[in-house]
Image: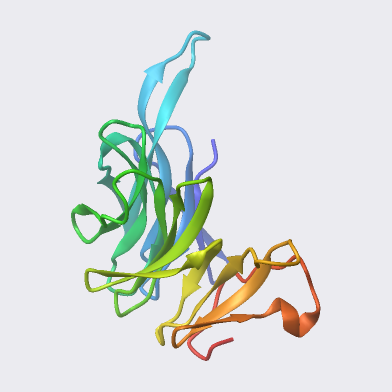
Amino acid sequence: NRHAFIWRDSVMTDLGTLTTGISAAKAINDSDEVTGKSDVNPQPDDEGGFEYDRGAFFWKDGSMIDIGHLGGHGSYGNAINNSGVVVGASLRMDSLVIKAYSWNGSIQDLGIDDNFRSEAWGINNSGKIIGWKDIPGGASEGWLFDAGLTTNLGQGVIPYDINDQGEIVGWYHPSVGGGTHAFLWKEGNLIDLSLLANQNLSAANSINSSGE
């Protein structure tokens, strides 16, 4: 089975799993606290094996903690800041809608949209959270969640990361020309990074505190 791990100073540490099966790490902070997903709730299948739900985890100092879920079967952690706050997505109680959440000892629905899918993808050390949600018509739009207030980043915008200055990167669908373009969102303005490189297919996955 595949297990999440930390690699430091040429030493690999197996993070284990919440039950059995597999686990995968998604993000790590400066204190080596980790989040990701792990198999949970093993149930016998028709072939003599097991089927699993997926559960988000928080790992610290050799212990893996089950973050839980928003009432449904399944959750995963996408990002963690230096305060140990985890964000991700979880199935709701009716198991029909995936919802963005934050976790700081207990899981909380961010309340982005009650009727459509939403996911949280990043959090900075000020607690600002970014993610995306589905909207009517099959499109998606990005959002920034800060102190209980949600800012719409625009239709077709998929944010991936946010730094401590509140600068956001990801990719979006431009209104003309097709393709996907990498972007930088800064001080309320979306800057198309693909135009700088004359590229029609690009995406930005991360940004550091220097804006690189």
Residue 168 position (above or below residue 101): below
Residue situated furthest right in the rendering = 198
Tell me residue 179's x, y (percent).
73, 61
Q: Going by the image, does 123 lie left or right of 46?
A: left
Q: Nearer the viewer, residue 33 or 53?
A: 53
Q: Position of residue 201 (x, y in %)?
A: 75, 65
Front in this rendered view, residue 100 or 177: 177
Q: Is residue 115 visible?
A: yes
Instruction: Give the tally of numbered discs.
Output: 0
Say if 132 sits above or below 167 in the image: above
* Quarter of image, res 192: bottom right
- Percent position of residue 186, x then y: 49, 85
In the picture, measured across the screen, residue 53 lies left or right of residue 146, that is right
- Picture quadrant where residue 211 is located: bottom right
Position of the N terminus, as image quadrant, is top right
Residue 154 vs 194, above or below: the answer is: above
Tell me what residue is drawn at x 19 percent, y 57 percent.
105
In the foreground, 176 or 42: 176
Q: Residue at x 69, y 63 (%)?
A: 180
Residue at the outermost left position: 106
Residue 164: image location, x then y, percent: 40, 84
Kindly identify the residue that appears in the image at 25 percent across and 42 percent down.
Answer: 70
In this view of the protein, can residue 13 be seen by the observer? no
Q: Residue furthest bottom?
A: 210
Left or right of 198 in this view: 37: left
* Colour option used: rainbow
User: What residue appears at the point 37 percent right and 76 percent down from the top-left corner?
Assistant: 124
Which quadrant is the C terminus positioned in?
bottom right
